[in-house]
Image (cartoon, grey):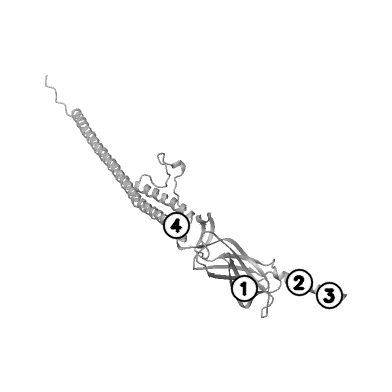
């Protein structure tokens, strides 16, 4: 009886240890990231979802750090990446990769992104990342469990046209096409952003915005070649509008500056002429004053001379 109890306890202990290794709930992923995707952001053709996209026939690359917080070493035989186009991509370790308790290790797995004929670009793809655990570091060994590192639904395979559309769309979608409502010209039906005093700039903005809207609608329908044409036209016209704005706007500013300088010079000249006229008048006033004072002094001299002149003796009587 005692032997049966001892054997039962031993088997239970072994089972608990194997269960713990098969389901490592105490270990965990510290950080994970797709490495240098061709595109990361909103995709209008995929319901405006935020996607991580790789160009077909180039390498996708995924990296993550994993912490062994068990009190015993963990033996890892492989890192696996599964995609919903039906493939498991596996990086196997030989010899077995043993991670000691409390240690963190960074893993990287990569492989070729399939062509869009194998993994269509018209919807996003599901993926899972796993690490496989084995019971020993030397053969023979047995897989005793797996840890799911990450999963997601936002992986996108991109053709060259699809990628170019996304880059153009994200650039143009961030353009401030509109006036604030408080500054909207009353006679304007389409509120394209731009200086209304430069007709060519305004027209180029208008055309660019029309091409952008048309290209965006076609992109949402998933017709990437045609969408690329219209988005490229929008980008070209927008660049021409900016160049024209820079050229003619700068010329207008220079003309305004030159006009201001000319007016300032004119006002300075007028002020200088006024000052000179005032100076001449002042000189004339001083001359008149001095001339008057001269006659006053002459008069005074005559009076004084008359007063001091010796009087003649009276004739004898």
Q: Characterize the local packing of mark 1: few (<14), some (14-19) or many (20 or more) Cα atoms within 10 angstroms.
A: some
Residues at marks 1 and 4 touching, judged by CB atoms closer than 8 Å:
no
Give how far across and how far down residue 145 sits, in percent. Answer: 68, 70
Q: Nearer the viewer, residue 177 or 262?
A: 177
Whether residue 133 is situated above or below residue 205 in the rendered picture = below
| Residue for badge 2 | 15
Whether residue 125 is situated above or below residue 13 in the rendered picture = above
Quarter assignment of residue 231: bottom left
Question: What separation in Å lies between label 2 and label 1 (alpha carbons)?
Answer: 23 Å
Question: What separation in Å lies between label 2 and label 4 (alpha carbons)?
Answer: 57 Å
Asked whether residue 70 is in view, the answer is no
Which element carries disc 4, helix, strand or loop? helix
Give how far across and how far down residue 189 sits, in percent. Answer: 42, 41
Mark nearer the N terminus (3 vs 4) = 3
| Residue for badge 3 | 6
Quarter assignment of residue 110: bottom right
| Residue for badge 1 | 78
Whether residue 312 is situated above or below residue 282 in the rendered picture = above
Q: Determine the residue positioned at 25% across, 38% down.
A: 277
Q: State left or right for residue 300 relative to residue 193.
A: left
């Amino acid at each position: 009886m005692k032997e049966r109890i001892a054997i039962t306890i031993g088997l239970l202990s072994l089972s608990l240890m194997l269960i713990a290794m098969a389901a490592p709930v105490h270990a965990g992923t510290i950080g994970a990231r797709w490495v240098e995707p061709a595109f990361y952001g909103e995709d209008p053709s995929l319901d405006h979802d935020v996607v991580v996209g790789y160009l077909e026939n180039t390498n996708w690359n995924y990296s993550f750090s994993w912490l062994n917080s068990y009190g015993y070493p963990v033996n890892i035989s492989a890192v696996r990446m599964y995609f919903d186009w039906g493939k498991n991509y596996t990086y196997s370790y030989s010899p077995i990769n043993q991670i000691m308790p409390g240690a963190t290790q960074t893993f990287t797995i990569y492989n070729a992104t399939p062509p869009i004929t194998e993994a269509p670009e018209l919807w996003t793809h599901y993926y899972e990342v796993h690490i496989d655990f084995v019971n020993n570091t030397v053969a023979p060994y047995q897989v005793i469990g797996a840890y799911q590192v990450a999963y997601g639904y936002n992986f996108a395979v991109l053709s060259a046209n699809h990628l170019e559309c996304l880059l153009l769309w994200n650039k143009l979608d961030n353009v401030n096409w509109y006036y604030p409502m408080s500054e909207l010209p009353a006679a304007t039906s389409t509120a394209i952003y731009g200086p209304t005093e430069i007709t060519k700039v305004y027209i180029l903005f208008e055309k660019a915005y029309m091409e952008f809207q048309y290209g965006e609608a076609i992109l949402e329908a998933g017709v990437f070649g045609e969408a690329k044409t219209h988005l490229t036209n929008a980008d070209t016209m927008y660049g021409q509008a900016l160049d024209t704005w820079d050229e003619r706007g700068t010329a207008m500013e220079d003309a305004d500056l030159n006009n201001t300088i000319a007016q300032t010079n004119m006002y300075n000249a007028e002020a200088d002429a006024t000052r000179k006229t005032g100076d001449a008048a002042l000189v004339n006033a001083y001359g008149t004053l001095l001339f008057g004072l001269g006659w006053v002094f002459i008069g005074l001299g005559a009076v004084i001379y008359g007063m001091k002149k010796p009087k003649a003796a009276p004739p004898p009587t």
